[in-house]
Image (cartoon, grey):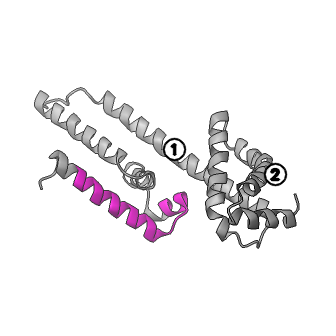
Amino acid sequence: MTSTEDRDLIRCALKGDQRAFEALYRAHRPRVYAVVVRRTADRDETEDMIQVTFIRAFQALKGFRGDAAFSTWLTQIALNVCASHLRAQQVRQGWEAMDHLHRIEQTPAHGESPEEAIYGRWRQELVRQGIQTLPSRYQEAVYLRYVQDRSYREITRTLQVPMGTVKTWLCRARRQLQGEFRKSGLLAA
């Protein structure tokens, strides 16, 4: 498909013509598939990421300036979707590994009473549940900062967001967790 045809279809899609966006989808899906399939081994994940790519492209279509070819712009969206998916997957795997470690540590420490062990496990579970209530971007930042002990600079590079954004996410995550912990009685009100 030529860039002129792409521009015409984009103009129509912006006016609400669903068939125009479907034509863009059909024309560019093979390229997006090629980008995504190289970054994941799972067919279902590949299909999901292709869908997310086109949803994001549709939502951002007004912002397409035409400085580059539509296919280049779409490829960059696909790469961003893949990177986000990979980061989220790493965070999930990290939380699962932590959860596994906590299960291993279920036996009371030497000299710890059964009540103290139960309270400690209850506290750990509340923290885990509280973290799961956070938006995924906050979870990623919390995991990188407090589990992997990464610096703010490392987190900004990993998540590809400005330093101020990382600090804001961590501040909001702490505030939200404090509220959750107060509700559950883990922190005094």
Q: Helix, strand or loop at disc 2?
A: helix
Residue 101 appears in which quarter of the rendering? top left
Quarter of the image with the C terminus in it? bottom left
Residue 54, position as x, y percentages in the image: 67, 53
Left or right: residue 14 versus residue 108 is right
Against 84, residue 62 (above or below) is: below
Left or right: residue 140 versus residue 101 is right
What is the three-letter code of the residue carrying label 2?
Ala
Against 35, residue 93 (above or below) is: above
Q: CA distance from mark 2 to mark 1?
A: 32 Å
The reply to whether residue 29 is in sight is yes
**Does the magenta-highlighted stretch encompass residue 155?**
yes
Residue 12, position as x, y percentages in the image: 75, 64
For image coordinates 62% across by 49% down, the residue present is: 52
Query: Disc 2 or 1, which lies upstream in sequence?
Result: 2
For image coordinates 65% across by 58% down, the residue present is: 58
From the image, give the main secondary structure of the stretch colored magenta: helix
Q: Nearer the viewer, mark 2 or mark 1?
A: 2
For image coordinates 21% across by 36% down, the residue present is: 122
Question: Which label is found at residue 64?
Answer: none
Badge 2: residue crowd in 10 Å (few <14, some 14–19, many ≥20):
some
Residue 21 appears in which quarter of the rendering? bottom right
For label 1, the residue is 90
- The residue range painted magenta reads 154-180
Question: Which one is in front, 7 or 105?
Answer: 7
For label 2, the residue is 27
Against 12, residue 136 (above or below) is: above
Q: Helix, strand or loop at disc 1?
A: helix
Quarter of the image with the N terminus in it? bottom right
For image coordinates 31% across by 42% down, the residue present is: 129
Report if the CB atoms under discs 2 and 1 are less than 8 Å apart.
Answer: no
